[in-house]
């Protein structure tokens, strides 16, 4: 049933679960929210925790409403969807469902919602379906989409279709006065501003050397990356399955949460292919990308382990590692010396450590990052994380001794660092990166750079034995 006109009303029958979904594909950051006044006079709101004081809610206790998360961050086009799940309405005198156009509101621009393609779908577990189009031509960055009211007869749904400014929202809607618009930009801005600073310092050093040695000869790799992305997307659309909020909502939500943490203007898709191997990869050109993960990861990895995997691949995009396709450089640039080839492989290994840091930032704690590495290397599960940490520490020390005693340059002709080295680099940086994720006052860039240099010295000392 479509509630087309303002003031149109429908009676909501009995239900165990009611979903309110905001759906759009335009390049705009919309935020779905709920504000309420209870029958005993309490007011409050459910909105993204990207805003200061934001609360995603709870289905098992008051307010019996839960928000899925924050989609479209950075005004990214695609299959954007936010959902409010409701299991009870009888505590409320009034419940307002609101959409904020954060993109325009934060820029103090007042466009019209009709410029975008958003709509709201309301579905109960009994099959009742209602649609409210977000197509107002009135200028404003906030839309009160609809309102639930409760009476002794039951609950009613009313199409409000009121468009207003953010200031009018906070003044007129119960519970909305607490929301701080600027706080979302500030909170996400920490990740946007600081993400480049997570790049491994040793990678930056090697990057300068490569640019100095090869210069303009590297320009072809940029165009090659664009062509590879186009060809790869055609293959993925034909042979893999694209993850959407409709198809795999939980996986899509985990993936979207990583994009939200990283921020910026990344624009890409997540695909799955059938494989028993624990593997993933990304093809990118600038900020446009496609991530491919193997189905075994979805079947076997925990949510936090997946966050590490997604974050790692997105780290490659953020740091634009696709600018230097080392095997193409070695194949197409004439006269590359053995020393330059060695530098290219060193850079590639260092770049993996940079990407690992973004993976750790996304999962927010060291254990799932380490278990993801362990499971990728071993194929095993069910091993206690403390045992894994102890084993990796011991294995790293033995590997370091072996590398320094056996001078085998061919063992270092590899694009990825050895797993125990990746573990050690993560372990050393973990406290600082987790602190940054929590935006803790204890985080210090000065302290982080000391650790970064310590890891660089460690890797350089091992690189020497590969030359």
Image (spheres, grey):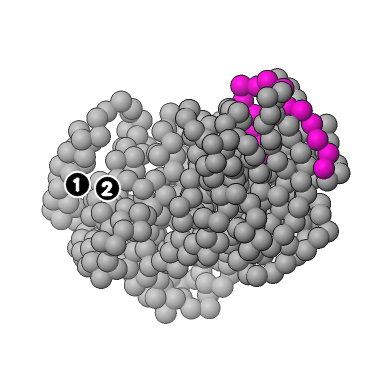
Number of other residues with Cα within 10 Å of mark 1, as a class: few under 14, some 14 to 19, many 20 or more: some
The residue where tag 1 is placed is: 396
Give x and y (percent) for residue 202: 31, 67
**Label 1 SS:** helix
Q: Is residue 369 above or below residue 223?
A: above
Contact between labelled residues 2 and 1, with CB atoms less than 8 Å apart: yes
The quarter of the picture where residue 461 lies is bottom left
Quadrant the C terminus occupies: bottom left
Give the crowd class for mark 2: few <14, some 14-19, many >=20 residues within 10 Å: many
Q: Is residue 274 visible?
A: yes
Measured as percent of width and height from the top left, residue 289 is found at 59, 54
**Residue 60 among magenta residues:** no
Q: Earlier in the sequence, mark 1 or mark 2?
A: 1
- Residue pictured at 46% horizontal, 56% vertical: 52
- The magenta stretch is 7-21
Indicate left or right for 232 with 189 as reference. right
- x, y percent for residue 70: 56, 48
> Farthest residue in the front direction?
40
Apparent side of residue 449 relative to residue 242 in the rendered image (left or right): left
**Eye-nearest disc, 1 or 2:** 2
Q: For the residue labelled by badge 2, is the local secondary structure a helix, a strand or a loop?
A: helix
Rounded to the nearest whole Å, what is the CA distance between mark 1 and mark 2?
8 Å
Residue 338 in percent (x, y) is at: 35, 67
The quadrant of the picture occupied by the N terminus is top right
Residue 346 located left or right of residue 19: left
The residue lying toward the viewer, choosing from 347 and 71, is 71
Q: Looking at the picture, tell me which residue is in the foreground, 378 or 60.
A: 60
The total number of labels drawn is 2
Asked where in the image residue 379 lies, by quadrant, the reply is top left
> Which residue matches tag 2?
423
Let me know if residue 19 is in the magenta part.
Answer: yes
Does residue 325 appear in this view?
Answer: no
């Amino acid at each position: 049933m479509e509630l087309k006109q303002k003031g149109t009303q429908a009676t909501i029958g009995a239900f165990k679960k009611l979903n309110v979904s905001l759906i759009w594909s335009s390049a705009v950051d919309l935020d779905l929210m709920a504000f309420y006044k209870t029958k005993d006079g309490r007011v409050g709101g459910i909105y993204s925790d990207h805003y200061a004081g934001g609360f995603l809610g709870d289905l098992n206790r008051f307010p019996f409403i839960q928000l899925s998360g924050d989609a479209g961050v950075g005004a990214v086009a695609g299959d954007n969807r936010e959902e409010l799940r409701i299991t009870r309405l009888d505590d409320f005198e009034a419940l307002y469902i609101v959409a904020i156009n954060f993109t325009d509101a934060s820029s103090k621009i007042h466009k019209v919602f009709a410029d975008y393609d958003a709509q709201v779908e309301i579905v109960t577990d009994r099959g009742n379906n209602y649609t409210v189009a977000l197509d107002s031509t009135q200028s404003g960055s906030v839309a009160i989409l609809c309102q639930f009211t409760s009476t002794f007869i039951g609950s009613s749904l009313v199409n409000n279709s009121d468009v207003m400014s953010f200031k009018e929202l906070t003044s007129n809607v119960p519970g909305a006065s607490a929301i701080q618009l600027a706080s979302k930009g500030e909170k996400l801005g920490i990740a946007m501003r600081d993400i480049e600073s997570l790049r491994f310092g040793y990678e930056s050093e090697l990057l300068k050397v490569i640019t100095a040695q090869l210069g303009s000869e590297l320009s072809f790799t940029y165009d090659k990356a664009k062509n590879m992305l186009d060809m790869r997307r055609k293959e993925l659309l034909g042979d893999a399955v694209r993850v959407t909020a409709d198809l795999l909502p939980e996986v899509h939500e985990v993936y979207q949460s990583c994009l939200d943490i990283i921020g910026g203007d990344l624009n890409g898709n997540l695909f799955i292919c059938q494989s028993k191997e624990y593997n993933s990869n990304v093809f990118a050109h600038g900020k446009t990308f496609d991530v491919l993960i193997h189905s075994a990861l979805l079947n076997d990895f925990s949510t936090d382990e997946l966050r590490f995997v997604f974050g790692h691949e997105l780290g490659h995009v953020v740091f634009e590692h696709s600018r230097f396709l080392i095997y193409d450089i070695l194949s197409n640039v004439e006269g590359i010396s053995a020393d330059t080839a060695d530098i290219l492989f060193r850079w590639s290994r260092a770049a993996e450590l940079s990407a690992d840091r973004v993976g750790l930032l996304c999962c927010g704690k060291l254990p799932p990052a380490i278990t993801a590495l362990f499971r990728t290397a071993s194929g095993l599960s069910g091993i206690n994380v403390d045992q894994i940490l102890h084993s990796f520490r011991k294995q790293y020390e033995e590997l370091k001794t072996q590398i320094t005693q056996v001078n085998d340059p061919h063992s270092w002709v590899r694009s990825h660092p050895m797993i125990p080295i990746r573990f050690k680099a993560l372990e050393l940086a973990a406290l600082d990166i987790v602190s940054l994720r929590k935006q803790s006052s204890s985080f210090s860039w000065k302290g982080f750079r000391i650790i970064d240099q310590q890891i660089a010295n460690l890797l350089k000392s091992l690189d020497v034995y590969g030359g």
